[in-house]
Amino acid sequence: PQWLAEHVLISKWVLAVSGTHGKTTTSSMLAWILECAGKRTGFLIGGLTNDFEVSARASQSPLFVIEADEYDTAFFDKRSKFVHYRPRTALINNIEFDHADIFCDLAAIETQFHHFVRTVPRTGRILVPAADEAVQRVLERGCWCPVETFGEGGMWQGEDTDDRACRIKRAGRTLGELRWLQQGVHNRRNALGAIAAAAHAGVAPEASIEALASFSGVRRRMELRGEVGGIRVYDDFAHHPTAIAATLEGLRAASQPERPQRILAVLEPRSNTMKLGVMKERLAASLAGADQVFCFTQGLGWDVQSALAALGARARCEDDLERLVAAVAAQARAGDSVLVMSNGAFGGIHDKLLAALGGRACGAV
């Protein structure tokens, strides 16, 4: 991060996208908006977007979009990475407790975001969700530039018109209707933040809405990996209870009323925070939107089955990947969506599931 700041970002208008959730998707949206506006911005995104061939690009543009992570800079520099970037446009999607291997509590994370806010110049702008209490606490500790809010109760708002469209407003004035391919309330909030950030950089909101209509998403964010016998297998990066619940909500909302789908959630608690069991009290509630839950417990030092007890017979835990795949394949039927959630490779489970479902369809299972 320090090298990047000193050799790449030093002369740029930096647009930094931060927050516990949604950084990769929102950064991708923002970069795509600027690309469609002819800016050919540089960017560094912590994931693979479907609209660019690369996740990082240098350019001659004065603009640079960066995914601004709160994780520590290095073994010898425990400041969050984003304090190096000194953005002119800073977007904070949300703030929750995560990275339990680095931070002792939410207050410690809020302190790092306070330092981040202090790096934004008076001529800059900070964009935040109106309804996030942790973000508001950070701003109350000191903020020296204009702030704009988005989401519920905010200056920038989106109102659903149907399951694939929302009406974008700023200060009560309708700017246009966004009709796009993305699912879920969380993605609508991501879009509002990206549109607001692009507006600060000189892109008309109407142009941003048009650009997002062609935004094709990010890999491992509700990515369809395949379909066998009417059973769809999705891959998603969700690994925090809030993200798990939001992903399930988005998939459920995409279900057609005349053809309600069952959702089989397959979870690998792989992040350091999940491995430590810090979020175990919230796990069952986050998975409540699934019809069946399968959890891979290999290598965990806490009792996942007890944590999921509230789900009753809907939840099943396995510490062997092959048994887990067999269990999911045995339960799945035509019309189901199998949602695999992990921030890791999960042992190649997606291909294993598709193979198992394909073998069953051929009579091999």
Image (cartoon, grey):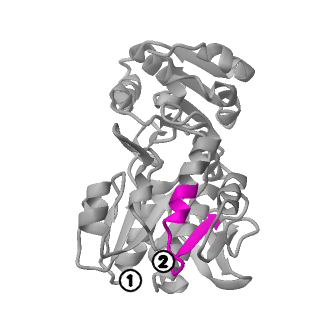
60 w.r.t. 18: above or below = below
Residue situated in front as seen by the camera: 327 or 77: 77
Examine the structure image and report whether residue 120 is included in the region drawn in magenta: yes
Q: Give the side of residue 90 with respect to residue 129, left or right.
A: left
Image quarter in which the C terminus is found: top left
Q: Is residue 341 above or below residue 17?
A: above
- In the depicted view, which residue is nearer to us: 219 or 274? 274
Where does the image place residue 91, in percent across and percent down from the top left? 53, 65
- Regarding residue 51, the answer to whether it shows in the image is yes
For the residue marked with disc 1, what is the amino acid?
Answer: Ala
Residue numbers of the magenta segment? 114-128
Query: What separation in Å lies between label 2 and label 1 (alpha carbons)?
Result: 10 Å
Residue 358 lies in the magenta stretch: no
Looking at numbered disc 2 in the image, what kind of residue is underneath it? Ala
Residue 63: horizontal and vertical position, in percent? 35, 76
State the SS at label 1: loop
Which residue is pictured at 35% across the width and 24% down the height? 359
Asked if marks 2 and 1 touch (Cβ < 8 Å), the reply is yes
Please tell me in which quadrant of the rendered image residue 45 appears: bottom left
Residue 98 bears which disc, if any? none
Foreground mark, 2 or 1, reads 2
On-image quarter of the N terminus: bottom left
